[in-house]
Amino acid sequence: MAVDKSMQILIVDDYKTMLRIVRNLLKQLGFNNVDEATDGSQALSKMRGKDYGLVISDWNMEPMTGYELLKEVRSDDHLKATPFIMVTAESKTDNVIAAKKAGVNNYIVKPFNAATLKTKMAAVIGDF
């Protein structure tokens, strides 16, 4: 099944530069329908108003972290099937295990490039 490159993707990060980097990487991969949120609660309200084909969220944010966002998404019947990729600067095993238990689909450690993002996304949503 081919991935629809017009699907909506939500990127969540409290660091504007990171939002811009991820948006540009997605554009390089052919995805142009990208929304942004600067923390988990903003992301959650956007997700409740629109269907996203993928969420790419940073782990460390205030006041609501990416991990808390993931747990909220997975406990919401309407949102729980949304593919979710967590981005973090730390590759702590405890974090990876916690995110997996909470239902994350994949995990990316910063810094990363378009090729890494494509590989991680393809593992979650299929080849494109």
Image: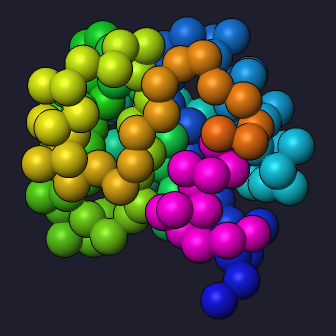
Q: In the picture provided, is 100 more to the left or to the right than 21?
A: left
Q: Going by the picture, which residue comes out furthest to the bottom?
A: 1
Q: Residue at x 21, y 54 (%)?
A: 103
| Residue 61 in view here | no
Q: Residue at x 60, y 62 (%)?
A: 122
Horizontal and vertical percent for residue 59? 34, 24
Main SS, magenta region, reads helix
| Residue 115 in view here | yes
Q: In the picture provided, is 13 more to the left or to the right than 35?
A: left
The quadrant of the rendering that contains the N terminus is bottom right
Q: In the picture provided, is 44 more to the left or to the right than 101?
A: right
The image shows a total of numbered marks equal to 0
Q: In terms of depth relative to the viewer, which is nearer, 50 or 69?
A: 69
Q: Is residue 51 above or below residue 114?
A: below
Q: Is residue 38 above or below residue 123?
A: above
The quadrant of the rendering that contains the C terminus is bottom right
Horizontal and vertical percent for residue 120? 55, 50
Toward which corner of the image does residue 81 lie, by quadrant? bottom left
Horizontal and vertical percent for residue 58? 43, 26
Q: Is residue 126 above or below residue 36?
A: below
Boundaries of the magenta span: 117-128
Say whether residue 126 is magenta. Answer: yes
Say whether residue 18 is magenta. Answer: no
Q: Residue at x 74, y 22 (%)?
A: 20
Q: Residue at x 55, y 10 (%)?
A: 15
Q: Is residue 48 above or below residue 20?
A: below
Horizontal and vertical percent for residue 93? 20, 26
